[in-house]
Amino acid sequence: MMRLLRYLLFAACCPAFAAQAQQLTLVHANVVDVATGAIRPNQTVVIQGRRIVRVESGSSALPTGGRVVDAAGQYLLPGLWDMHTHVYFDGTAQAGTDLILPLLLANGITGIRDMGSQLDSILRARAEVAAHRWLGPRLVVSGPMLDGPKSPYQAAIAVATPEDGRRAVNMLKARGVDFIKVQSYVPRAAYFAIAAEARKVGLPLEGHVPDAVRAREAIAAGQRTFEHLIGIFEASSPDEDKYVSGSSKSPGRFLATYDARREAAIIRQLAAAHVWQCPTLFWERGQWLVDAIDWRADSAGLAYAGRSWVAQRWPRSQQGIAKTMDYEPLAVREKFVAHELAMVRRLHAARVEFLAGTDAPAGVDLIPGLSLHQELQRFVEAGFTPLQALQTATLNPARFYHRLQDFGSVQPGRLADLLLLRANPLADIANTRQIAGVIADGRYLSRPALDSLQAKLRQVAASK
């Protein structure tokens, strides 16, 4: 009942969005080509239902009927994707429907890849959003993660044996998930059984490189993504075999044993096999420097964080992470964070492909939606141009899913998942925050509607 009441509030403040998508025409828009960086001025974009039907210069022959939006001085581009989320995850799961999903949308994120959530909840959310009954981005989902027999996570399936792994893959396939997500503690034999079974049933394998598996073995097994750069650090050290055998890892040890030649070798393998990287750079910085970052000073973001996150979850996480790092001086961890950015630069120079993802809201001070804009800024700090950073959240997800016919450009025939900005994101990546409007599956949220929605979301956050 509470979810229904809150949805009705959203529908009241965003009536055009709550309704079925109708005809929408944007005039005088600057259309951004995120493949080339070209900007086409004074474009008329006509949307009928869920798809773009016309894009042309000028506005002399406007369609009759529907809504017309004057986008003069504004920049129209594909909607953003957050390619690493956890909408219904452990202690934040109860906020998934009425806070996390609409908050993502309010920040211009029209698609997500969910990397580990409660199964029933995430499957229902995927269906409800697709049917325009809930506010949120379109969802590509794994359901619960596959992890080891002593996984610390509720949104995980414990896997101890190869048979456990095969059984989990087949259950998830039967339930209709889009891919399989593996976590760090999956046992070695179980991992290879999971990889083989996923390949057999036609589900992509994505996620962490488990502690018991080498990066090159994960590549050979067909794993499609590496999250958080896990596996590459280990492969860049002569101690990789020791890590696979259970030896402890740490930023200081990675730095002390770093071998540039080994790193170059694994980078070549990743590039040749087209294994995508989702490095979650903003989260990585927050994890390794958690004791040095004052998240309480983030007044704008905290207004959208669940009250229990701020009062209980984040302080506990901060203390727990800090305890595991008490043997690593802050200066060493700062050096490691810089090393991560340099590694991303080298991967990018070698044409390894990247996806923008945040891990929100699983970490400390990871506000759903807001954190993706921070992630794009971290890519720029790693040496990407604003266009290249923008591609990690627009063009690259379309390529990753082999759906360029639907996403990644503002062209006739494409799904109308679009973002309208007040300033040019190619001039400054921070301009992705200057949102004038969001179009999700053909439904339009104007700036006033977004303001109303965000005010409601601040109220919801205060109750969480």
Image (tube, grey):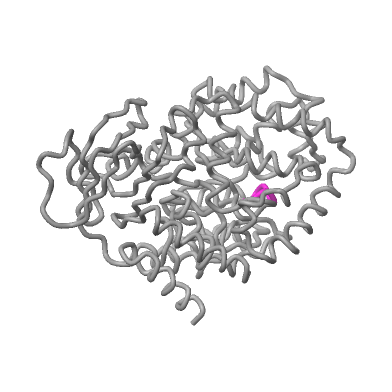
Residue 367: x percent and y percent?
60, 53
- Predominant SS along the magenta part: loop
Q: Quadrant of the C terminus?
A: bottom right
- Tell me what residue is drawn at x 51 percent, y 27 percent: 352
- Tell me what residue is drawn at x 51 percent, y 79 percent: 2
Residue at the outermost bottom position: 1
Q: Is residue 36 left or right of residue 168?
A: left
Residue 207 visible, this angle: yes
Residue 27 to residue 457: above or below: above
250 or 173, which is in the foreground? 250
Residue 27 to residue 272: above or below: below
Residue 113: x percent and y percent?
48, 51
Residue 441: x percent and y percent?
32, 55
79 or 122, which is in the foreground? 79
Report the number of discs.
0
Q: Is residue 211 left or right of residue 63?
A: right
Residue 198: x percent and y percent?
48, 51
Q: Report the magenta residues as a range.
A: 183-189
Indicate whether residue 331 is drawn in magenta.
no
Q: Quadrant of residue 237?
A: top right
- Tell me what residue is drawn at x 56 percent, y 53 percent: 368
